[in-house]
Amino acid sequence: MKIYMDNCCFNRPFDDQSKIRIRLETEAKLYIQEKILKKEIELVWSYIIDYENQFNPFIERRNAIEKWKSYAIIDIVETNNILRDAELIQKLGVKSKDAIHVACAIEGKCDYFLSTDDSLLKKLSNFDKIKVLNPLSFLSLLEV
């Protein structure tokens, strides 16, 4: 099983943990990372993760996220196909960088695209090119 996590997902453990939903999504994301380390789930990385992460103002967070690149089975680079797919995804109301993330996940033949961005999740709830979930919903699939 291959997954792609966007920057929102990677940053979830650094968010304010006082809200139960954020804590639960953080725990789910950390559990998923354990599965990646055990090679039970394959992680796909992309140039847009690198691009967005370089602007993270907190160096310790930036470094913590960057280290996950070494666990990825593939690092997706920009192609015309990705840009075309991203343009089509944008027509669904998705922001350009988010659309590139999704297009990279599709290019990487991922089974799931994980995000904690509610707006993105809602816009792609019926998207048929890839299953889009938050980490908590994805965890419920693993536990079946």
Image: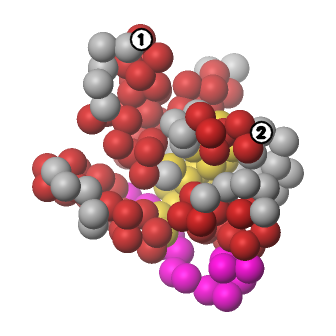
Q: Residue at x 27, y 66 (%)?
A: 54
Q: Tell me which segment is drawn in magenta.
A: 71-84
Q: CA distance from mark 2 to mark 1?
A: 23 Å
Amino acid at circle 2: Ser
**Residue that mark 1 sits on:** 20
Query: Up-down: is 49 above or below 122?
Result: below
Q: How is the image coloured?
A: secondary structure
Is residue 80 at all visible to an observer of this figure?
Answer: yes
**Residue that mark 2 sits on:** 125
Q: Is residue 28 left or right of residue 114?
A: left
Q: Secondary structure at mark 1?
A: helix
Closest to the observer, 111 or 77? 77
Q: Quadrant of residue 98?
A: bottom right
Q: Residue at x 41, y 11 (%)?
A: 20
Residue 79 within the magenta-colored segment of the rendering: yes
- Counting from the top left corner in percent of width and height, residue 5 is at 50, 50
Q: Secondary structure at mark 2?
A: loop
Q: Residue at x 27, y 35 (%)?
A: 14
Q: Quadrant of residue 72?
A: bottom left
Q: Is residue 40 left or right of residue 55?
A: right
